[in-house]
Amino acid sequence: MKSYRKELWFEVPGRRGFVNITPQVEQCLKESSVNEGLVLVNAMHITASVFINDDERGLHHDYEVWLEKLAPHQPTSQYRHNVGEDNADAHMKRQIMGREVVVAVTRGGLDFGPWEQIFYGEFDGRRRKRVLVKIIGA
C-alpha cells in the first residue's frame, strides 16, 4: 500500500470565496502514483471548508446568499464568540458546508459522478490557509 500527503495553500483575497481545487487534487493523485484507493481532502482551518458540487457560478452565488441567511455576518454582536473577533459566522458556515471529502480512486483517476468537482470554501479569508490531501492505495 502507498501513502501520499501534501498540503495545498490558499489565500482568498476577500472574506468569502469558493475555489475549484480539482486540478490540484488531480496533480497530487498523479504524483502519488496510486491507481486504486482513496483520496481524503480536508480543510485544516476551522473557518474553511472542502466540499463537492457543480462548478457553476449561479450555484456559488446561491450558496453565498443561503449561507448568509443561515449565519449572517452582521451584526457581529449577535455572537458570543465575537468578543475580540468577528468570525463566528465563518465557523457556522464551515459547519454547514463540511470539513472534508473522500473520493474513490479508480484506474488512476478521481471516480466522480457527473459534474462533480472539489471546492475549497473560504468563510474568513484574507490570510493563508491550508488543505490536506491524503491519498492511500495501491
Image (tube, rainbow, N blue to C red):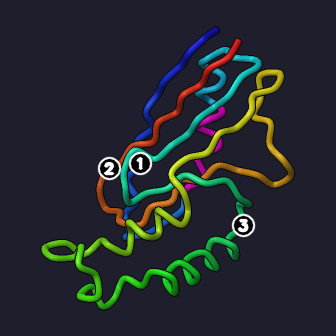
Instruction: State which tag comes first along the sequence, 1 or 3.
Output: 1
Label 1 packing within 10 angstroms: few (<14), some (14-19), many (20+) = some
Which residue sits furthest front? Answer: 80
The residue that mark 3 highlights is 56
Question: Element at badge 2?
Answer: loop
Residue 136: x and y, percent? 62, 20
Quadrant location of the N terminus in the rendered image: top right
Establish if 84 lies above or below 1. Answer: below
Query: Answer yes or no: do the residues labelled 1 and 2 have beta carbons within 8 Å?
Result: yes
Query: Answer yes or no: do the residues labelled 2 and 3 have beta carbons within 8 Å?
Result: no
Which residue sits furthest bottom? Answer: 75
The residue that mark 1 highlights is 10
The reply to whether the magenta stretch includes residue 23 is yes
Residue drawn at x 47%, y 69% is 93
Q: Magenta residues?
A: 19-26
Please identify the quarter of the rendering in which residue 12 is found: bottom left
Residue drawn at x 77%, y 29% is 109
| Amino acid type for the residue under numbered disc 3 | Glu
| Amino acid type for the residue under numbered disc 1 | Phe
The residue that mark 2 highlights is 128
